[in-house]
Amino acid sequence: MTLPAPLPDPEGLAVHGPFREPDPKPLSLVLVEAASGTEPQITLGDLVDHLSSRGLAPLILLMGLINVFTIIPGSSTILGLPLVFLGLSLLIGARSLWLPARLRSKSFDRATLHRVIERALPWLHRIERLAHPRWWPWGQALLDRAYGAVVLFLGLMVALPVPFGNTMPAISIILLSLGFTARDGLWVAAGLLCTASALGIVMGVAGAVTVAGARLLGF
């Protein structure tokens, strides 16, 4: 399977802060490169190493995309925990994600990764056309910690066992990742608005499930 070629990045809006490399690339290109290869399987360690070499933002973005485009019943806790660790890593100023050897050796189908990225690329390209530095009042240290705190919070929301409760937080993560890496305050604001909506939806669904369960049990 051949993934569409990513858009050029004439303004160099790829990765900033702890997500910066000397020759920045757009996140869409980083994800395409991560999925490239001829082996049918790819280990989690190899994927993390490739994405972490560009910083944590591409890895966070990929986890958001997986949560949006891969709906597996009962998988929210598994998919949410990596986001929690990524958020903690940003909060302590880490530039890469440490994983236990057992997790690093886990492998999955490369074709599945191709499908997720292929479905997401058209949307990423549209956003990357519109993202550029603006409305950015924060300093670098505050940026890193704020991004980490929000990712940690959203990761906890994704991990909650709420039916379909991971989609809106994952969309928030995608918008915030693109906004923070491009230093685009408008997209960050959109991501924060989406975060508030996600919180309301998750709390509403959790409340409804709790009430329904209480009624069934006769409380």
Image: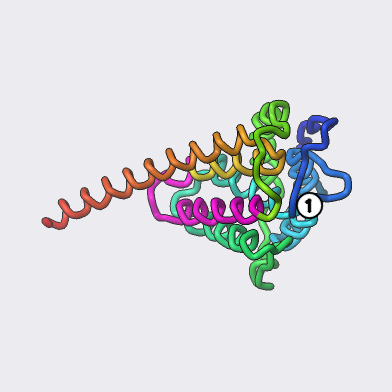
- The secondary structure type at the circle numbered 1 is loop
Q: Quadrant of the N terminus?
A: top right
- Residue at the spot x=68%, y=55% of the render? 141
Above or below 164: residue 81? below
Front-most of residues 32 and 60:
60
Image location of residue 162, percent across then percent down: 38, 50
Q: Which amino acid does label 1 sit on?
A: Arg
Residue behind mark 1: 54
Image location of residue 179, percent across then percent down: 65, 39
Image location of residue 100, percent across then percent down: 65, 72
- Residue at the spot x=64%, y=65% of the render? 92
53 on left or right of 201: right
Residue 115 seen in the figure: no
Front-most of residues 69 and 24:
24
> Of all residues shown, which one is farthest toward the left?
218
- Residue at the spot x=81%, y=41% of the render? 25
Span highlighted in magenta in the image: 142-168
171 on left or right of 181: left
Q: In which quarter of the image is the C terminus?
A: bottom left
- Residue at the spot x=65%, y=45% of the render? 138
| Main SS, magenta residues | helix
| Residue 151 shown in magenta | yes
Front-most of residues 195 and 210:
195
Front-most of residues 175 and 70:
175
